[in-house]
Amino acid sequence: RLGGEERLEQPIADLRRDPGAVFGHDHLDLAHAFGLGILHANLDADPTALACDLDEAYAWQAEHLRQVLAEGDDAVVGAKLSVTSAPMLERLGLRAPLIGPILRSRHHLSGATLPRRRFMVCVVEAEVGFRLGRDIEGTLSREALLDAIDAVFPAIEVADSRYARWAEAPAPAIVADL
């Protein structure tokens, strides 16, 4: 349980740059591509040339999420950590994993059949899922997190992206691509 989508938003003082100038496309076009289930026409450009920081990318993720939730009958049902291994953290120049929302429309029970045509990239990954039995109040610590865990279970993630060259995407592009 997240206690609301606001926990996914990073504090942003201001967006100093125009998303279109930074990404070469507008972040709302990314949300539109997400909603339609299509690759965005401008997203096959060199993703390594994207010039923004993680704060800006999390701001775009929050706006993208706001738009997706406003356009349909969806909700945030959890959070996803990505880039959790030491080699991937090093490759992307990160000190901590990335975080993103898990939407109800993208959460399926065991045994579900997912049509391949619903995914642009369709990378299947074995994951470990954690269900929290309660919200964590105050400062996050290892002990508080362990005490809040209600269940641990196997999970399968079907990762997707609107980027044609998704494997080359830097951390901010991964964050912005809900």
Image (cartoon, rainbow, N blue to C red):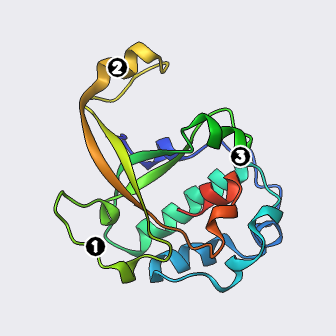
13 w.r.t. 43: above or below: above
Q: How many marks?
A: 3
The x and y percentages for residue 115 are 30, 79
Please name which of the two marks, 1 or 2, marks the residue nearer to the observer.
Answer: 1
Instruction: Identify the element where label 1 is drawn.
Output: loop
35 w.r.t. 109: above or below: below
Q: Is residue 137 visible?
A: yes
Q: Can residue 133 be seen in this view?
A: no
Instruction: Identify the element where label 2 is drawn.
Output: helix
In the rendering, which numbered label is found on residue 146?
A: 2
Which image quadrant for residue 159?
Answer: bottom left
Does residue 58 appear left or right of residue 82 in this picture? right
Residue beneath label 1, please?
A: 114
Q: Residue at x 56, y 37 (%)?
A: 85
Does residue 56 appear left or right of residue 131 in this picture? right
Amino acid, disc 1: Leu
The x and y percentages for residue 23 are 76, 68
